[in-house]
Amino acid sequence: MRIELASDPAAPPAPNEDYAAVALPASGAGGALVVLDGVTPPRDGDTGCVHGVPWFVARLGGAFLELAGARAGTLADCLADAVRRTAAAHGPACDLTHRRTPQATVAAARWDGETVEHLVLCDAALLLERPDGAVRPVLDLRLSRLPRDLPAEEMRNREGGFFTAAADPEVAARAVAGSVPRTEVAALTALTDGVTRWTEVFGLGDWTALQGRLRKAGPQGVVDEVRAAEAADADRGRYRRGKVHDDASAVLVEL
């Protein structure tokens, strides 16, 4: 088994708001991975919470990975319980009903000798590569399907909009989730949208090409290619995106 991980902050020394980790059991052939992309707060910093996004993603990601690795229910069950744990850790000074309370997008997978499970929430992504090289992207397309003239923030965690993991455990049931036989998966990759820019923003190749580059150059190599593309369009004149650079994380697992 090959496992490689890269997580690169957008603008050091500003903290990385992504989380990426893998857990392997002491015995058996299974494992789990979790990748989170924390939602950057507004410039005024008004989130109703005394904690920053790095605090939030570290706790949510750590709890989710622990529960997923312990096989405490489905991945959606594990995410819901991780959200509950994290909400309980906030304390009375945090208004968890605030629409900007710390939150994150999610990509997760878990595998054993029989099955590969997957879960995606919002604009993180999972790529599942078959033994014949075909690549299936697991995507939550609700955000991308919103009209461009509609402020995305107004539609976050609302019916008819899109969903992120924040303080409501019920959102886990909104995730795109499923499973496939392990024999149908040769490799899988979890990505934040700072890396999916390679395909979705800069058009350097389709999902199959991206998976191929991840296999050949490794996650850090692909992140470096994204950084080069960002730098070549620093004024965002050619490629439309909210930030010049974004935190970028990828986990590659070859089973």
Image (cartoon, rainbow, N blue to C red):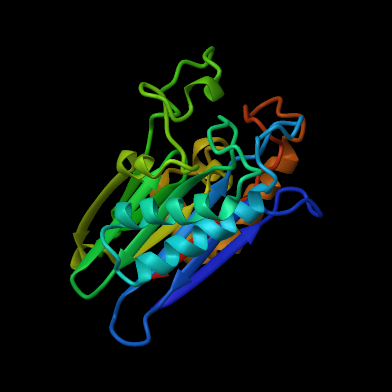
In percent of width and height, residue 159 lies at: 36, 23
The residue positioned 58% from the left and 59% from the top of the image is 58
Within the image, what quadrant is residue 133 found in? bottom left
Residue furthest to the bottom: 27
The residue positioned 35% from the left and 58% from the top of the image is 78
The residue positioned 43% from the left and 51% from the top of the image is 84
Of the 4 image quadrants, the one containing the N terminus is bottom left
In percent of width and height, residue 243 lies at: 69, 35
Observer able to see residue 201: yes
User: Which of 188/176 is in front?
Assistant: 176
Within the image, what quadrant is residue 231 found in? top right
Residue furthest to the top: 149
Residue furthest to the right: 13
In percent of width and height, residue 47 lies at: 66, 35
Of the 4 image quadrants, the one containing the C terminus is bottom left
In percent of width and height, residue 80 lies at: 37, 50
User: Which of 225/176 is in front?
Assistant: 176
The residue positioned 71% from the left and 37% from the top of the image is 244
Number of labels in the image equals: 0
Q: Judge from the rendering whether residue 115 lies leftward or rightward of residue 213; answer left or right.
A: left
As drawn, 248 above or below 239? below
As drawn, 248 above or below 39? below
Q: Judge from the rendering whether residue 183 lies leftward or rightward of residue 40; answer left or right.
A: left
Observer able to see residue 255: no
